[in-house]
Image: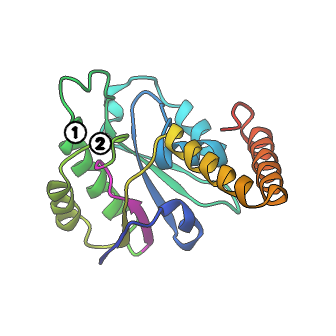
């Protein structure tokens, strides 16, 4: 069964599912959107990704499960090489790789509750055709309970701007509220750095 939730960020619902699917590339770049949030806050996923071979095209169409006791289980789906020349082609999703990943998900996680962004539709994991992506999901996902979160993922800069705008709006309203928001952001950033060992944002 497939359920679609529109305009809601999957990242806010990670603990509601058995497994979270994340589309990614073969170059270990988890730089934007849900990939970035997972990389920063669940470093065991990034560490597992780093165990794979950089740029290895044999990863395409395969899955990489990343699990840790007491934490959400993620499954990286290798569906793109990368997009080094967006001026030459906006759609860089490898549809055969997506199809292979979906087939494997349907077998590996039979009977499980799975959540996923619309794999391959984001600017950061393929920028593919939504109609074709939905067709592939409906064709190959038959034995898992899948919830697709169809929303616009944001780049790192876009995420940071939302935080900045929220803080500046608070500054105009109430300086104490602004101070508390900044302190909270910095504390969370320090905690992320302690957890992942290399980045605050």
* Residue under numbered circle 1: 94
Left or right position of 90 against 71: left
Q: In this view, does 64 lie above or below 141?
A: above
Identify which residue, 40 or 109, lies in the foreground: 40
The structure residue drawn at horizontal position 17% and vertical position 49%, both measured from the top left corner, is 129
The structure residue drawn at horizontal position 37% and vertical position 25%, both measured from the top left corner, is 56
Magenta highlight range? 112-121
- 2 or 1: tag closer to the N-terminus: 2
Identify which residue, 195 or 32, lies in the foreground: 32
Q: Is residue 115 magenta?
A: yes
Q: State the image coordinates of residue 6 (x, y, percent, origin top left).
A: 35, 69
Classify residue 166 by image quadrant. bottom right
Q: State the image coordinates of residue 153 (x, y, percent, origin top left).
A: 42, 51
Label 2 sits on a secondary structure element that is loop
Label 1 sits on a secondary structure element that is loop
* Residue under numbered circle 2: 61
- CB under 8 Å between discs 2 and 1: yes
Q: State the image coordinates of residue 156 (x, y, percent, origin top left).
A: 53, 39
- In space, the residues marked 2 and 1 are separated at their CA atoms by 9 Å
Q: Which residue lies furthest to the front in this view?
A: 172
Classify residue 12 by image quadrant. bottom right
Badge 2: how crowded within 10 Å, few (<14), some, or many (20+)?
many
Visual colour scheme = rainbow
Left or right position of 57 against 34: left
Badge 1: how crowded within 10 Å, few (<14), some, or many (20+)?
some
Q: State the image coordinates of residue 54 (x, y, percent, origin top left).
A: 45, 23
Q: Is residue 161 magenta?
A: no
The structure residue drawn at horizontal position 15% and vertical position 58%, both measured from the top left corner, is 131
Left or right position of 92 against 36: left
């Amino acid at each position: 069964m497939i359920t679609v939730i529109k305009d809601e960020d999957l990242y806010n619902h990670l603990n509601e599912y058995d497994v979270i699917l994340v589309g990614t590339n073969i170059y270990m770049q988890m730089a934007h959107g849900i990939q970035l949030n997972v990389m920063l806050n669940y470093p065991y996923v990034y560490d597992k990704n780093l165990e794979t071979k950089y740029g290895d095209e044999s990863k395409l169409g395969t899955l990489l499960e990343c699990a840790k006791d007491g934490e959400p289980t993620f499954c990286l789906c290798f569906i793109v090489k990368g997009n080094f020349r967006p001026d030459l082609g906006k759609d860089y999703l490898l549809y055969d790789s997506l199809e292979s990943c979906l087939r494997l998900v349907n077998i590996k996680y039979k009977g499980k509750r799975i959540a996923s962004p619309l794999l391959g539709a984001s600017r950061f994991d393929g920028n593919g055709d939504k109609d074709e992506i939905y067709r592939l999901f409906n064709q190959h996902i038959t034995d898992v309970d899948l919830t697709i979160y169809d929303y616009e993922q944001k780049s790192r800069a876009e995420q940071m701007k939302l935080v900045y705008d929220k803080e500046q709006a608070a500054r105009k309203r109430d300086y104490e509220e602004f101070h508390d928001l900044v302190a909270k952001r910095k504390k969370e950033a320090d905690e992320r750095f302690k957890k992942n060992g290399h980045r605050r944002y």
